[in-house]
Amino acid sequence: MICNSSLSLYGYWSLSSDKMSNQLQTNLIAAAIGATIGVISAASIFIYQKVLEKQQHAGKNAHLDEVDRRLTELQTELERLRVQQNQQRKKKKLNPKRENDTTYATTDNDTDVDFSTAGDEEFFDCSDSDNGISDIENRTTEATCPGLNLSALDAHHQRDGHEEDDYLELRNLVDTYPDSVDVVWRYARSCYKYSNCTTDANVRKAVICAGIDACEKLLDVQNADLHKWCGVLVGVNGDFLPVAEKIKNGYRFKEHVMKALEMRPNDADLHHLLGRFKYEVANLSWIERKIAATLFSEPPSASYEDAIDSFQKAEDFSVKVNLENWLFLSKCYIALSNYKPACQWLEKICDLSVTSEEDERIQNDARQLLAKYSGYQ
């Protein structure tokens, strides 16, 4: 399931959604309404002017942007060195006799270190088991690198509670095999998982950006998992971007998901991600749509019905229960005032026995929605 930690799937801007009108009437009520609308219009014009000012001063801010980019690169490198050092210490504790062994092999001693992606995230979060982002990890993948056991890496990924170990291992491997798409997309997946486990915003940003950079070097390779996990990282990276960049990020996210779907049209997780994008677009306020239209010639467009279609496809193709998908199906029906199917999905969530923290969170959300809308059926 996709974890909803940030998860506004794409981190879009939050502004007032009051409707505007230019008509003024002579009576007191109309005058009051006109005054209110005038204030909102002025606020929207002010916001738009601020956006234009930022664009006009882009040249002046170029140097600051470059400094910020370099700082991010330094942060990434420092994080890489830190995790490498931690990994070396752990390996020494596990088997001191192997300190001089420079050959990577998937032996029992190697797997004594826990590697996992137990966390659930949100947004879009998009984590593997908890958030609806699960790869077809049992499919046979031919190793493209001599001596590298990819099935062992996927087994490490399945273990819970050791996201950092998984990240450390793959961080080293992606340095050794930067042109291996099978290594890079797994590294991107570990970046997402690890970023959900750290509370340090700078580390989280650095890890996410490092994963995106690694993926973008291989985007000419036709690989569904590469585009899937690059898209996920692009989505969560919106947390660190200004409003206009967040909007562009949404386009990039959709691009990656659509390319992945072209290569793997029956992937339930990809349909869920596309549904999340459509839901967020359908949920935009009137003012948000107007501002998007001023910034882009083709602002995003989608309806709740469109989102339901994608979520239903995710349900049809899914081989396991995805509570996050059920929750968003119910939210779409609620938005359409179609409360009967909404409550049916919510009841299904509430009737299940859950064990993970993420599933408990989803179930609590479902109970609150069910208590609020069950009387509307």
Image (cartoon, rainbow, N blue to C red):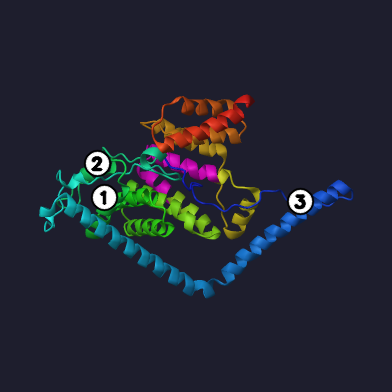
The tag on residue 168 is: none
Q: Is residue 254 above or below residue 350?
A: below
Q: Can residue 189 be seen by looking at this rendering?
A: yes
Identify the residue shown where x is 42% and y is 67%: 69
Q: Which residue is mark 3?
A: 21
Q: Is residue 52 left or right of residue 130?
A: right
- Which-is-in-front pick, marks 2 and 3? 2
According to the image, label 2 marks what residue?
Answer: 155
Residue type at the position of mark 3: Ser
Find residue 294 and report its image quarter.
Answer: bottom right
State how far apart marks 1 and 2 are (Cα). Answer: 15 Å
Magenta highlight on residue 272? yes
Q: Tell me the SS state at disc 2.
A: helix
Nearest to the observer: residue 221 or residue 292: 292
Lower sequence index among marks 2 and 3: 3
Q: Is residue 234 magenta?
A: no
Secondary structure beneath label 1: helix
- Disc 3 and disc 1: Cα gap in Å? 55 Å
Q: Position of residue 62 (x, y in %)?
A: 49, 73
Q: Would you name the residue on which mark 1 appears?
A: 182
Query: Callout 2: few (<14), some (14-19), or many (20+) C-alpha neighbours within 10 Å?
Result: some
User: Residues at badges 2 and 3 in contact (C-beta under 8 Å)?
Assistant: no
State which quarter of the image contains the N terminus.
Answer: top left
Q: Amino acid at mark 2?
A: Ala
Mark 2 → mark 3, Cα distance in angstroms: 59 Å
Instruction: Between residue 194 and residue 14, name the one nearer to us.
Output: 194
Task: Specify the quadrant that holds the C terminus.
Answer: top right
**Percent of width and height locating residue 111:** 19, 45
**Pointers 1 and 2 in contact (C-beta within 8 Å):** no
Where does the magenta region start and end?
256-280
**Front in this rendered view, residue 310 or 335:** 335
Q: Main secondary structure of the magenta part?
A: helix
